Image (tube, rainbow, N blue to C red):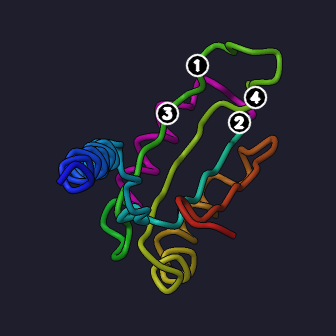
Amino acid sequence: MRTTSRRVPAIAVLLGSFLFLSACQSIRPQPRPVTLPSAAIQHLVLIKLDDPARVPEVIADTEATLAHIPGIATLSSATPLPPTSPNALDDYDVCSQIAVDHEAAYTAYTEHPDHKALVARWRAHFVSFRIVDFLAGADQ
């Protein structure tokens, strides 16, 4: 009988340890699934104008012209913040951010007559411009 009574506590300790460790595993933070944002393609346009006084006019025209183009999920235009780092870009007057959900929407936006007309209206006033396109939230 002595061997049976020793086995019961040993089994109880093992079972208790297993349950305790299982509970610890379940309270660990679980990784969240990665999902693409609703507007996966980000299109940034950085523009340096020949006359910085025209910035408000460029921003207003950009937003009024592009806002109704189908496929654009988000649109915003703004001026740069003062640099917070020696590596921060500050050689532009306007940054426009256009986000679309997929490549077909991006192509439709770039080929849209209103987009082309906006660029044609202002291109003569660009000292320089840069375009940055990227796929947000995706592993390349």
Which x, y percent locates residue 61? 43, 48
Q: CA distance from mark 3 to mark 1?
A: 9 Å
Disc on the earlier residue, 3 or 2:
2
Which dot, 2 or 1, sits closer to the camera?
1
- Crowding at mark 1 (Cα within 10 Å: few <14, some 14-19, many 20+): few
| Residue type, label 4 | Leu
Residue tagged 2: 49
| Residue type, label 2 | Leu
Which of 131 and 86 lies nearest the eye of the viewer? Answer: 86
Residue tagged 4: 89
Marker disc for residue 81 = 1
| Residue type, label 3 | Ala
Q: Is residue 84 above or below residue 132?
A: above
Which x, y percent locates residue 68? 30, 66
Q: Using the rendered view, name the quadrant where residue 11 is placed.
A: bottom left
Residue tagged 3: 78
Residues under numbered marks 4 and 3 in contact, where contact means CB atoms less than 8 Å apart: no
Q: CA distance from mark 1 to mark 4?
A: 9 Å
Q: CA distance from mark 2 to mark 1?
A: 16 Å
Q: What residue span does the magenta drawing correspond to?
A: 50-66
